[in-house]
Image: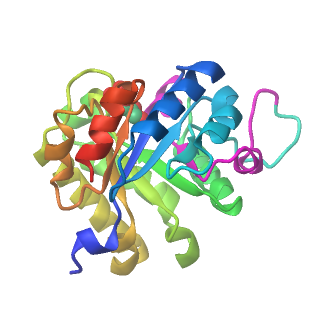
């Protein structure tokens, strides 16, 4: 098996969720650009839609990439309130989160929606980060692995090799999001192994080895290093701790 250090670059994405006006986002982006030390980790931020274009300007010329938090799968049309993948690409995004648990649980995104969104992101030349994760109820019932496997399968089953090359998966146990209750490094690594095995079964071991699998859920500066130590943990998707430059930079620097 290839050494993951050499095949998968560490990725850290700050998901700002519904925080930051354009001006606040630009200020935070400028602080990140000024404070980020060169390292191995690829760093991205995901502002709300309204801040994408100004934050893209603030990041121009830096190593920090721009991500969107969601997308609608159609290219254009009468879909009031929706934003398409080509619009996000034109705003400067190279990465789009799809299937975040808040999209699934607050807005009702189903596996089929997540699959369509991932395909739209790929069609527009960007990289989808497919978020998966079980609820506490599902974990307590012993269903966590099956839930996560079926969420992965719903998106990955029919992707081509070229599409798989741009895929990232993020494991975010719902019970660890915004709760301060981080999965232990052992729980995270165990589920990342399940996801990697599931990718191998669906797409072959080469694609599975190349796909970055990120962890998200109450990641902070003081637990990032321990979580990243897992052999199958390739990066972090950070919510609350990405809203301030100091806490997010601490995590970026812990990642390389
Ligand atoms: P928190 O880091 O605030 O728990 O959020 C995690 C998350 O949902 C990132 O997408």
* Quadrant housing residue 24: top right
Total number of numbered discs in the rendering: 0
Q: Quadrant of ligand 1?
A: top left
Measuring 49% from the left and 66% from the top, which residue is drawn there?
157
- x%, y% of residue 113? 61, 44
Position of 94 with respect to 236 (left or right) is right
**Residue 42 lies in the magenta-colored region:** no
Instruction: Give, as a single range, the part of the protein colored magenta.
Output: 80-106
Whether residue 240 is visible: yes
- x%, y% of residue 77? 88, 41
| Residue nearer the viewer, 7 or 148 | 7
* Quadrant housing residue 134: top left
Is 101 placed above or below 76 here? above
Measuring 39% from the left and 66% from the top, which residue is drawn there?
211
Position of 37 with respect to 2 (left or right) is right
| Residue nearer the viewer, 40 or 47 | 40
Is 235 placed above or below 105 here? below
Position of 223 with respect to 47 (left or right) is left
Tell me which colouring the rendered structure shows: rainbow
- x%, y% of residue 121? 64, 54
Measuring 22% from the left and 36% from the top, which residue is drawn there?
139
* Quadrant housing residue 218: top left
């Amino acid at each position: 098996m290839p050494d993951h250090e050499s095949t998968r670059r560490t990725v850290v994405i700050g998901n700002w969720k519904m925080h930051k006006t354009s001006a606040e986002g630009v200020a935070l982006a400028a602080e990140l650009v000024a404070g980020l030390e060169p390292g191995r980790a690829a760093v991205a931020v995901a502002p709300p839609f309204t801040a994408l274009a100004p934050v893209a300007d603030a990041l121009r010329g830096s190593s920090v990439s721009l991500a969107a938090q969601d997308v609608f799968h159609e290219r254009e049309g009468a879909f009031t309130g929706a934003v398409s993948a080509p619009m996000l690409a034109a705003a400067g995004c190279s990465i789009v989160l799809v299937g975040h648990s808040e999209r699934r649980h607050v807005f009702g995104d189903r596996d089929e929606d997540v699959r369509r969104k991932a395909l739209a992101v790929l069609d527009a030349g960007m990289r989808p980060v497919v978020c998966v994760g079980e609820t506490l109820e599902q974990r307590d019932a012993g269903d966590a692995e099956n839930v996560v496997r079926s969420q992965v399968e719903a998106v990955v089953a029919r992707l081509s090799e070229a599409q798989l090359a741009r895929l990232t998966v993020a494991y975010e146990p719902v019970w660890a999001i915004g709760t301060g209750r981080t999965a232990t490094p052992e729980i995270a690594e165990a589920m990342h192994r399940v996801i990697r095995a599931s990718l191998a079964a669906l797409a072959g071991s080469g694609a599975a080895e190349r796909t970055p699998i990120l962890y998200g859920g109450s990641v902070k500066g003081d637990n990032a290093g321990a979580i990243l130590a897992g052999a199958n943990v390739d990066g972090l998707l950070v919510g609350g701790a990405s809203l301030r430059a100091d806490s997010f930079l601490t995590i970026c620097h812990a990642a390389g």
